Amino acid sequence: MLMSNRARAPKIESQLVSLANAGIRRDGRWLVRGVDFSIRRGEVVTLIGPNGAGKSTTAKLAIGVLRPDEGSVARLSGLRVGYVPQKLSIDWTMPLSVRRLMRLTGPLNDADLLAALASTGISHLIDAEVRYLSGGEFQRALLARAIARKPDLMVLDEPVQGVDFAGESALYDLIRSIRNSTGCGILMISHDLHMVMAGTDTVICLNGHVCCRGTPEVVSQSADYLKLFGNSRSLAVYNHHHDHTHLPDGRVMHGDGSVTDHCHPDDGHHHHDGHDHGHSDHDHHGGHHHGDHAEAKGEGRV
Amino acid sequence: MFDDFFTRALVAGIGVALTAGPLGCFVVWRRMAYFGDTMAHSALLGVALSLFFQINLLIAVFGVAVVVSLLLLALQRRQSLSADALLGILSHSALAIGLVLVAFMTWVRIDLIAFLFGDILAVTRTDIALIWGGGVLVLAALVWLWRPLIASTVSEDVAEAEGMKPARTRLLFMLLMALVIAIAMKIVGIMLITALLIIPAATARRFSASPELMAVLASLIGALAVVGGLFGSLHYDTPSGPSIVVAALLFFILSLLPAAGKNTAEKAGNQGVR
């Protein structure tokens, strides 16, 4: 499954897929360029960005639907992918039940099939014809299909589009619980910034290139992000992790265990730059999770 | 009534219909009706080349259909013209070149009508062997390719992402199409092969709850159309190809009747299970 330039692509067992300076060009225009990131087992990576930023293109690069015109993409050999594309139109002349859709790309036993449908809440639609499903029901069916494959990597391109408000958070909870129970990696594209902030390990903000990346907290406060999405107060950060702790004596203990007198973004102890230290909800208690976010390291801006 | 030539025609026609049914379903699902037409029209060019170079007719027709479909794929990739316009250009120019070439070869006399619209009398024992041999080959390949074909018909992206090779699947599907066109040409004729692919599949749609059932029903409906059409052709002294297509059309119209729907569905369903 390895693509071009084997030597250049880092080949680490825990990395399910890694993109190195990947770019794709169509009609003389770069759709995306210089994309660098990797997904490890158990990691949720979310791509955000405006329309036309190249989110779906990047996802397709990662799973080999598109080949890079520049750079390289390496996938773990034998990587099992479950893919929920952004758009899927089934010609109505094909009689396809939900049950049959579940077995689209591989055999599946009844127990797993039923369990996956139950998890997305559409057990009752098992024999329904796909063309009569509503948009939200269809998304649930597609998600169930991807889950039932028990993939190493799930790629979800706007998985909850058309799903009702109550269902949305339930499906996001489900996606998280699947990651927790199976340890699969997840690459997600989402416009729901609440979800992005709450359930993602790494956020990559795209706009033809990687604008900024890091933990949700980092990205939501970076200038590039604010430029693209505006300074929306409603975007609460649910889990606020810090890479440093302010000690009672005024010194600062960093995520790497070192202690300094001051707190500077560029002192090398921080996992990212562009971090805003002036925010009011700064949590000064000890016992944070530190160092969990290696992905954020030195990648504040490109 | 059952003259020897007629039995041969029946056996050959049923063989073609059984093969064309499942393939026709994919032509319908993938919206390739015009594509199939183009490949079929190119068959006349194959006929002309086979006469000119004195090579086997079947091989020449198959070869030309493959070349035309590859040409189409290549041209579509350049995206300079819409697929629709490209198909129109290739379809009619292949047919026209074939007709012109045949006219040039004044030393051979061929029954053009037989090639264009099929001819019962032309069916030989060798043809039957080729039709059933080729048909078994095509159906075996379809069974082998079934899951990737269905998956890439639903979504090439999903198929590719989940470890299938939709580009290879598409290519193999075209080879199968070319083979069916080559073996069906004698029965229904170049102009009407697409009808034998599409009409039984469209008729089967209404009574099918799964792609698999639709494929089986399309085969059976096609076989019924062949039997009905050939008897009609014998009785009314009409050309075999058009008679088969008219019979298929009658089944299609019957399937549209609202009252007939339910009963026929059950009957057809039982047939499908057997």
Image (tube, coloured by chain):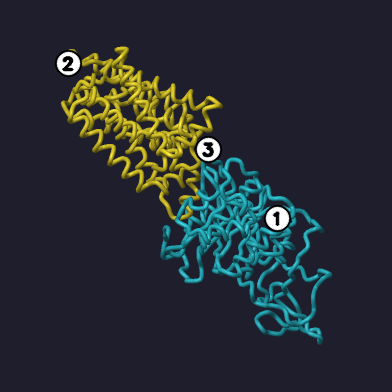
Q: Chain of mark 1?
A: A
Question: How far is the residue under mark 2 from the one under mark 3?
Answer: 46 Å
- Observer-nearest of B9 and A231: B9
The correct choice, above or below, for A263 with respect to A201 in the image is: below
Circle 1: residue type: Glu
Return the mark for residue A91. Answer: 3
- The chain that hosts pointer 3 is A
On whether disc 2 and disc 3 are found on a single subunit, the reply is no
Residue B164 x/y as whole percent = 42, 52
User: Percent position (x, y) of residue B108?
Assistant: 17, 16
Q: Secondary structure at mark 3?
A: loop
Q: Residues within 10 Å of mark 2 (few under 14, many from 20)?
A: few
Chain identifier matching the cyan colour in the rendered picture: A
Circle nearer the viewer, 2 or 3: 3
- Type of amino acid under label 3: Asp
**Which amino acid type is shown beneath numbered disc 2?**
Val
Image quadrant holding the N terminus of chain A, namely bottom left
Q: Which chain is yellow?
A: B
- Neighbour tally class for label 3: few under 14, some 14-19, many 20 plus, Cα within 10 Å: some
| Near-viewer residue (B29 or A200) | B29
* SS assignment at label 2: loop
* Residue A26 horizontal side relative to residue B236, left or right: right
User: In the displayed structure, would residue A249 be above or below residue B169?
Assistant: below
- Sequence-first tag of 1 and 3: 3
Residue sitting farthest toward the right: A280
Q: Which residue is mark 1?
A: A168
Residue A18, visible in the rendered structure = no
Identify the residue under disc 2.
Answer: B108
Q: Residue at x 32, y 44 (%)?
A: B141
Where is residue B245 drawn, in percent x and y? 38, 22
Instruction: Give the number of marks.
Output: 3
Residue at 21% across, 29% down: B127
